[in-house]
Image: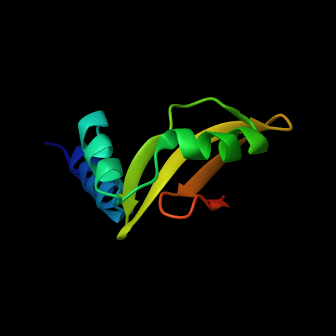
Amino acid sequence: MSRIAAHLLALGLTACCALPAAAACYGPLQIRQMVVQGQAIPLSSVLPQINAVGQPISVPRLCDDGGSLAYEVDVVQGGSVVHLRVDAHSGAVSR
């Protein structure tokens, strides 16, 4: 491997590892179980809050980000894309 290729590989690995860890998101069966157990409110309960902010352009996902559960979704608001987090316990919306 050339020195240039080795240097580029090292830079790529450094950049990759420097990124923050992505939130762990759950599948439909896990979400249903969390809702049944009272760990999260159903998505149907937070859709009005999401729709009040803007038109969803991604599928809402339930994610654990540092110990708190939140529905995450991207919406279009006034011509801009906005990333929303909806607390899965209270339904509070944040950006």
The quarter of the picture where residue 29 lies is: top left
Q: Is residue 2 left or right of residue 67?
A: left
Q: Which quarter shows the C terminus?
A: bottom right
Q: In this picture, is 44 found above or below 67?
A: above
Identify which residue is drawn at 46% across, 52% down.
41
Specify the farthest residue to the bottom: 67
Identify which residue is drawn at 35% across, 49% down.
35
Residue 92 % position (x, y): 63, 62
Residue 79 % position (x, y): 83, 34
Give 74 or 51, whichever is nearer the viewer. 51
Residue 84 % position (x, y): 62, 51
Identify which residue is drawn at 32% across, 54% down.
16
Q: Which quarter shows the N terminus?
A: top left
The quarter of the picture where residue 73 lies is: top right
Give 1 or 88, whichever is nearer the viewer. 88
Q: In this picture, is 11 found above or below 32?
A: below
Count the labels in the image. 0
